[in-house]
């Protein structure tokens, strides 16, 4: 039988107090980040369906603006997670082009393994890997350039936006760390 302590949440650390001002700032950040990516997609002629904007970035925005202190929201995880996941997804699609169900599973699983091994775990990266496999033909036709844009460039744009918005208030700081977390 599974122990209750494994299932029940242990709230030992109180949640950060959120004010209306904080919520508005985070909404503004998410708006600027996602709308900025969309603006590039819908105004820059590229001949592709998506130059920078993918659905996984919506989940990334939740992390970098709504939960900026979490390990998953730090620059290393944000950028590294999307780039490694895109690479895993494209590679699995290229190796198994006639079996999208298998490529989807392998690509997502490989993305998780790569992120865990490199300490760049970013849950939206799973969506980035999956989209490389199940996305439209225009995504498939991008090949490995999908790793550079939208994955890498989009993550860097969100990072830049998060750096600006999350550091407007003097009492707030983002990121908590760039490459390595300081020991507790």
Image (cartoon, rainbow, N blue to C red):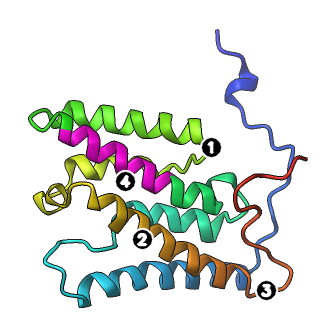
Residue wearing tag 2: 154
Residue wearing tag 3: 169
Q: How many marks?
A: 4
Residue wearing tag 1: 119
Sequence-wise first label, 3 or 2? 2
Q: Nearer the viewer, mark 3 or mark 1?
A: 1
Q: Nearer the viewer, mark 1 or mark 4?
A: 1
**Element type at mark 2:** helix
Q: Is residue 120 left or right of residue 97?
A: right
Dot 2 alpha-carbon crowd within 10 angstroms: few under 14, some 14 to 19, many 20 or more: many
119 part of magenta stretch: no
Sequence-wise first label, 2 or 4? 4
87 part of magenta stretch: yes
Q: Nearer the viewer, mark 3 or mark 2?
A: 2
Foreground residue among 6 and 79: 79
**Element type at mark 4:** helix
């Amino acid at each position: 039988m599974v122990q209750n302590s494994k299932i029940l949440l242990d709230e030992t650390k109180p949640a950060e107090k959120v004010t209306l001002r904080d919520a508005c700032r985070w909404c503004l950040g998410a708006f600027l980040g996602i709308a900025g990516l969309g603006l590039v997609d819908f105004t820059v002629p590229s001949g592709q369906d998506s130059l920078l904007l993918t659905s996984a970035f919506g989940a990334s925005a939740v992390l970098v603006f709504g939960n900026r202190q979490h390990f998953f929201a730090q620059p290393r995880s944000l950028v590294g997670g999307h780039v490694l996941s895109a690479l895993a997804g494209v590679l699995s699609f290229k190796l198994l082009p006639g079996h999208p169900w298998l490529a989807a599973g392998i690509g997502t699983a490989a993305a998780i393994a790569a992120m865990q091994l490199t300490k760049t775990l970013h849950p939206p990266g799973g969506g980035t890997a999956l989209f490389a496999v199940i996305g439209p033909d225009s995504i498939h036709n991008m090949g490995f350039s999908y790793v550079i844009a939208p994955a890498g460039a989009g993550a860097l744009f969100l990072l830049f936006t998060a750096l600006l918005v999350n550091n407007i208030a003097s009492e707030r700081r983002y990121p908590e760390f760039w490459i390595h977390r300081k020991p507790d």
